[in-house]
Image (cartoon, helix red, strand yellow):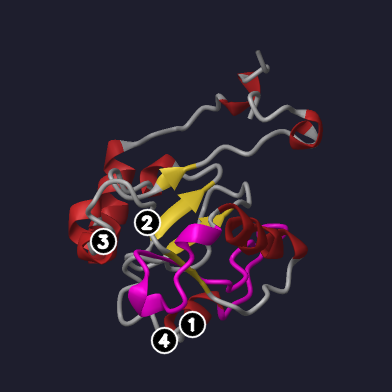
Amino acid sequence: SPNESWCYRDTGFSPSAQAQYRAASPDRQCSMERCFDLSRCSSNGRDPPSLFIYPEKPPSKDMALLPDCLRQCHSQAIADTAEKACLILPTVNVNCEWDQCHPATHQRLRELPSWGKSGRNHIIWDFNDAQNVKYRTDQALFIKTSMNIDHYRAGLDVPFPLLPNGVATHATPSEL
């Protein structure tokens, strides 16, 4: 089995820091029930959730790989418009390189026609290992590597560990 010792880290969880973070904005109190519109998703239990991926290519190579991979792997579930989709993947570059984000990242997300005022049903996938998020995600579902545990919204956000460098290039599918 693969060596997983790399993924165990001291989280430094602080209930008071989490309460303070959440009190600063209602969006930080999100859960699946509060901030996700399940009525947009298939209810038959057999079909995968529909996914709309914005057609623009992200400027960074890393961020461009994810939409292409999802389009190939989930071609049956790709929706042709955001209005028809359960999940919406913006292609705004959110992968802050060297812990530096473009200052307009949040503004670019909010300018998306599907974002509305909240970002509901949007997926923000940030696989940068900096713990703090440098832009607001509003009510969007957030998938993040090395997420600061105080900023994690239980029942909505998805912590996602990074594989160590090079592991994915020589691991078998069963090891991943």
What residue would you read off at disc 3?
36
Q: Earlier in the sequence, mark 4 or mark 3?
A: 3
Q: Is residue 95 magenta?
A: yes
Question: How many marks do you count on the picture?
Answer: 4
Residue under pointer 1: 107
Sequence-first tag of 2 and 1: 2
Q: Based on the displayed image, in which of its 4 quarters is residue 15 positioned? A: top left
Pointer 3: residues within 10 angstroms few (<14), some, or many (20+)? many
Q: In the figure, is residue 116 to the left or right of 148?
A: left
Task: Report helix, strand or loop for mark 1.
Answer: helix
User: In the image shown, does 82 or 139 lie closer to the viewer?
Assistant: 82
Region in magenta: 75-104
Q: Is residue 89 left or right of residue 121?
A: right
Q: Looking at the image, is mark 3 or mark 2 nearer the viewer?
A: 2
Q: Amino acid at mark 4?
A: Pro
In the image, taking residue 96 as reference, residue 11 lies left or right, namely left
Residue occupied by mark 4:
113
Give the secondary structure at mark 2.
Answer: loop
